[in-house]
Image (cartoon, rainbow, N blue to C red):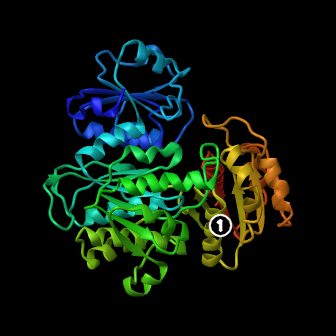
Amino acid sequence: MESQDVDINKIKKAYFVGIKGVGMTALAQVLRARGIKVSGSDTHEKFFTDEVLEKLKIPLHEGFRKSNIPKNTDLVITSTAYFNVTRQSRVTLNIEIQETLKRKIPILTYPEALGLLFQESYGIAVAGTHGKTTVTAMLGVILEEAGLDPTVIVGTRVNQWGSNARASTRGIKSPNRGGRDRAPLLVAEADEYQEAFLNYEPKGLIVTSIEYDHPDYFKTFGTYKNAFRKLVRKVPKDGFIVANWDDENIREVTTSARCRIVKYKMNQQKSFKLKLLVPGEFNILNALAAATLVHELGVGLPIIKKALANFQGTARRFEILQDTNPIIIDDYAHHPTEVQATLKAVRGRWPKKEIWVVFQPHTFSRTEALLKDFSSSFNDADRVFILKTYSSAREVRGKVGAKELAKGTAKHHKRVQYVSSIPEAVKVIKNELNSKQVLITMGAGNVWEVANVLGRHFWRVS
């Protein structure tokens, strides 16, 4: 099924396979706001999206069964973890996908379905190796403050919304210079994995950073950069690209652009003078990206500065779960550059505290490809715990994992310890952690459970 064969305006009932995924949950919210009856299924594993789905009363089946798919379903939307159309083979073992194909129900992957929304919208895509989630959230908050009523799809919970999506309540006149016809404003995080972002047709694009990642799909840095080249070329001549000009890889990739390039750099903070609640130099750069784009849409600097000054951050992005006795933070950092930047921010904010980090590698292929960089990325930490590699639908095994990372890190750091499970990590840390330390959990898997359990423990005993 091709996305162009589906008219989203004629869909009355949609079913989501893998609905707990952050993008899937966000899309479910947006479609439901359009009057589409939405339900879905996923595994029993718990995520923050469970709370979002429960709050919105979106029916959720835990476990995959043929009978889960409602009668008269017009469209099935699936996570690429269960039905990967980017590969040559469309064969899947998921029983609900098999039933969908048997019943000849139209089926789209998440990127294909989001692509339909781009087709009918004035779409803004936010891409890059780092920062795209925070920049997307910042854009949403600024545009909301400006009264532009955007639809926004973010890769985690935006704290001000209590959700990872915002659905527009009305169409708006496209705010770009030149005044196009009325069209809804869509802002969406654009993931490069499996070249998913090539399903989108953005009028505006932000590229925050380009560093090698996802080696399980992109076998070389060259193929990784080439995906961004393809995305850059998709922006039409009358569109625009907001590009981090401090990044040499972005300067290289954007040479293929057909449209206007709007540049931003860290030194522009001197003129913008943005004040933020969220810490770290990386968040200043994120804010500059968002400010530059909305300024292109005609939003004034006073509104931009007000919205960013009140921006409360997002879940799992330097999220302070407990602010005293001890301080406990959770973060999504899963790339060496992100680890270094986040630990630098922790050190800058609490220079007199010991910094303990629990890091959980995400995918064996990434750990293997970036092992050297990972091993030397914990220099701002006083103690490092390496948790067993997170096993997901993407990869369940590999040559290089957490044990190898712990050995590599020990060459650069005196206090490194491998822990085989979340309960073990909690047990080891609980009896030693006190008000002298800052504990930060890091990773794209379920390492956040360590922070949550320890947070509840110290809240009870304080």
Figure check: 37 above or below 189: above
Q: Amino acid at mark 1?
A: Asn
Residue 367, x across and y down, in percent:
72, 50
| In-image side of 119 versus 399 (left or right) | left
- The residue at the point 77 percent across, 48 percent down is 402
- Looking at the image, can residue 313 be seen? no
| Image quarter in which the N terminus is found | top left
Residue 288, x across and y down, in percent:
41, 74
For label 1, the SS is loop
- The residue at the point 24 percent across, 28 percent down is 11
Most foreground residue, 353 or 342: 342
Residue at the spot of label 1: 325
| Image quarter in which the C terminus is found | bottom right
| In-image side of 119 versus 101 (left or right) | left
Most foreground residue, 43 or 218: 218
- The residue at the point 25 percent across, 67 percent down is 297
